[in-house]
Amino acid sequence: MASIVFDNVAKHYGDAFVAIPGLNIDIRDREFLVLVGPSGCGKSTALRMIAGLEDISSGRLLIDGELANHLAPRDRDIAMVFQSYALYPHLSVEENIGFGLRVRGASKAEIAAKVRETARLLELGDLLGRKPSQLSGGQRQRVAMGRALVRRPKAFLMDEPLSNLDARLRGHMRSEIARLQKLTGVTTVYVTHDQVEAMTMGDRVALLRLGVLQQLGAPRELYDNPANMFVGGFIGAPAMNFLKARLALDDAGLRVEIGSFRMPISSEVLALRPRLADYAGRTVMLGIRPETLKPVSLTGTTEGVLRGAASFIEDLGATRLAHLDIEAASSLAELPTEADEVALMSPRLKVSFDAAYPVQRNELMGVTFDLARVHFFDMETELAIRD
């Protein structure tokens, strides 16, 4: 097993394009680290630099404490699992798993023993005599993993290995890969654009944007305490809502204003985020997750209630997701998810609620929220306003 360290590692393609300006990540021994981000963010480039498939323009890459910048791929003792299974169609499952050992000159007895052990871990024991064409997509992916695992490498590198599978099978394979990593203890770097995979599989998650590390931490840390608007908008499904709000101050204290909407900021919230007082009289961005918005009746008081028409409702089974055209629609904003994507026009407020709540399409709906569960961001820097 091994640790992997990116020490200000950069990747330039000539003078025209900088894929990664300078990456600093310390991947711990036996850790499962997920590199996540939108297309073009540099996550696969970072993975390929670990494998030796991409040259490093500057900085240092350390594998198990050894400088690896100029090591040949075969000398790094790294195993890769790709998006495509890349199995030999004319070989059996047993022969595919043991192929790498045979190339390295291992004895037949050693190959047979290691293949049987690996097949047991992957629950492939009954399939060793089959050809890839006789396997399901999930079984082929397990064979591809077995071919990497049988070598007992220092680290696994996985480049979106589940993207070719259907949704149900992806969910099953997520748990299988995570289970296997814990059983073997092999340091694993897993690349994906799917934030659900990142949240459910990794010990830690590194979120990249345009080659720059946005935040590194446990999945729950990125969800609960996003460092900036991009992290808040990328992590979480459905995506976070963003609303421009003015922090007004008068004799009654500090309050949030969104159009005609008013909500006082309690002393408890200010104790959690004392820096909010510095933003009195300024506009900030609120980040509100759809699941923290609570539907309320529009009869009686409407203080502290956002109103809007449910232009569209998605039925997700146990929950429903309403897209509201709110009265303060001009305050809504939406972040682009891809490096070259423009922000959408006229975004709607997304509200996740229990499927039993009675609301129909085009019906007026009221929602409220707890400011203690709202994220505040600086409009200029897009950084989270924290204590």
Image: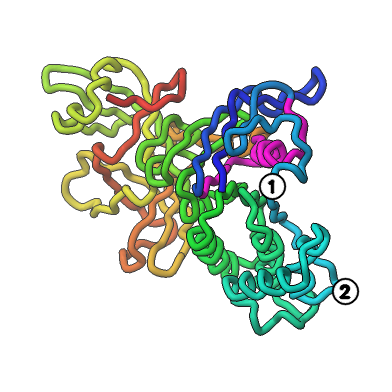
User: Residue 262, how many percent across, how many down?
Assistant: 24, 32
Please identify the residue farthest to the left as the structure is shown. 251
Give the secondary structure at mark 1.
loop
Viewed as shown, does residue 363 lie left or right of 190? Answer: left
Residue ID at (41%, 35%): 226
Q: Residues within 10 Å of mark 1 (few under 14, many from 20)?
A: some
Residue ID at (80%, 78%): 131
User: Residue 300, how many percent across, how many down?
Assistant: 16, 49
Q: Magenta span has 126?
A: no
Quarter of the image holding residue 332? Answer: top left
For residue 384, above or below residue 136: above
User: Residue 347, how many percent across, how many down?
Assistant: 51, 40
Quarter of the image holding residue 321? Answer: bottom left
Residue 36 in view (yes/no) = yes
Foreground: disc 1 or disc 2: 1
Q: Where's the C terminus, which quadrant? A: top left
For residue 156, above or below residue 131: above
Write down the region rendered in magenta: 32-56
For residue 132, above or below residue 245: below
On the image, numbered disc 1 is attached to which residue? 77
Q: Residues within 10 Å of mark 2 (few under 14, many from 20)?
A: few
Q: How far is mark 1 from mark 2, CA to CA?
A: 27 Å
In the image, what residue type sits under mark 2? His
Kindly identify which numbered label has been placed on residue 353: none
How many numbered marks have been drawn onto this rendered protein structure? 2
On the image, numbered disc 2 is attached to which residue? 90
Residue ID at (70%, 28%): 19
Q: Magenta span has 52?
A: yes
